[in-house]
């Protein structure tokens, strides 16, 4: 069984997730820690629970989801894994983040790119890859079928959806991704998004004003 620890980090209030199981191995997803205090929160949690980070995953490569990639690499030697269609999004960050008054440590680039479908694993656990572009050009979500939850990134939020006015965004593509790739999941599937509170697939089917 997978346990989930959620942190909310950086000036954009991004949700960073650590997933771990009974083996002690863990996956770090969308590390958004921005300063030393936030970095220490992650290190302390991992130490206190005796965890061994073995995967660094990015749902997509907007700056707020990759602030901590370099730190995770320095601490645990993990390079990020994401879909290759996000690479140019990652590479663009140094060109615009300083203009926002933000500091960014250059993320390492992947040695392993993730496909549009398939699985990644840590410990005794597996996450299914779900391709859901629209908010960004090659966004992936991670579905834990055995535990019926989704790490959803910036695709589907509580009564909202990801913005599509950023480079690589496409509104109709995002709506299609949600309806065709996420709404096929069980109604009671818990969705842990990149910002804000968790929700369920069934609740969003009924109540999300963008998807009626």
Image (cartoon, grey):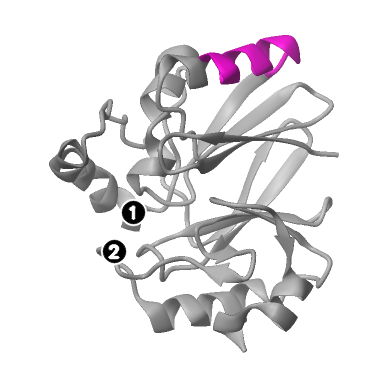
Does 42 appear in magenta?
A: yes
Closer to us: 13 or 127: 13
Residue 52 seen anywhere in this rendered image of the structure: yes
Q: Give the secondary structure at mark 2.
A: loop
Quadrant in the picture for the C terminus: bottom right
Q: Is residue 42 above or below residue 107?
A: above
Q: Residue at x 47, y 50 (%)?
A: 114
Q: Residue at x 23, y 43 (%)?
A: 93
Q: Which mark is residue 166?
A: 2
Instruction: Pinpoint residue 120: horizontal percent, then vertical percent.
Output: 61, 45
Residue 11 horizontal side relative to residue 45, left or right: left
Instruction: Pinpoint residue 27: horizontal percent, then vertical percent.
Output: 62, 33
Residue 112 seen anywhere in this rendered image of the structure: no
Instruction: Pinpoint residue 131: horizontal percent, then vertical percent.
Output: 51, 65
Residue 145 horizontal side relative to residue 106, left or right: right
Find the magenta span and give its range.
40-51
Does 46 appear in magenta?
A: yes
How many numbered marks are there? 2
The CA span between labels 2 and 1 is 13 Å
Q: Which mark is residue 172?
A: none
* Residue situated furthest bottom in the rendering: 212
The rendered magenta stretch, by its main secondary structure, is classed as helix
Instruction: Pinpoint residue 192: horizontal percent, then vertical percent.
Output: 66, 52
């Amino acid at each position: 069984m997978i346990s989930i620890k959620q942190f909310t980090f950086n000036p954009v209030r991004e949700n960073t997730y650590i997933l771990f199981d009974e083996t002690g191995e863990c996956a770090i997803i969308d590390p958004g820690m921005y300063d030393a205090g936030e970095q220490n929160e992650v290190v302390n949690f991992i130490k206190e629970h005796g965890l061994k980070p073995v995967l660094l995953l990015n749902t997509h490569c907007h700056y707020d989801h990759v602030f901590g990639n370099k730190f995770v690499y320095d601490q645990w030697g993990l390079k990020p894994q994401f879909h290759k269609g996000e690479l140019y999004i990652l590479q663009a960050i140094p060109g615009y983040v300083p203009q926002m008054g933000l500091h960014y440590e250059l993320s390492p680039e992947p040695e392993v790119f993730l496909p549009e479908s398939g699985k990644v694993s840590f410990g005794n656990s597996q996450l299914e890859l779900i391709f859901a572009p629209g908010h960004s050009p090659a966004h992936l979500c991670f579905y834990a079928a055995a535990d019926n939850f989704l790490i959803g990134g910036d695709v589907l939020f509580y009564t909202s959806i990801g913005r599509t006015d950023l480079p690589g965004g496409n509104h109709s593509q995002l709506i299609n991704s949600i309806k065709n790739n996420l709404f096929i999941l069980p109604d009671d599937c818990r969705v842990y998004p990149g910002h804000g509170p968790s929700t369920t697939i069934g609740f969003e089917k009924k109540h999300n004003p963008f998807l009626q």
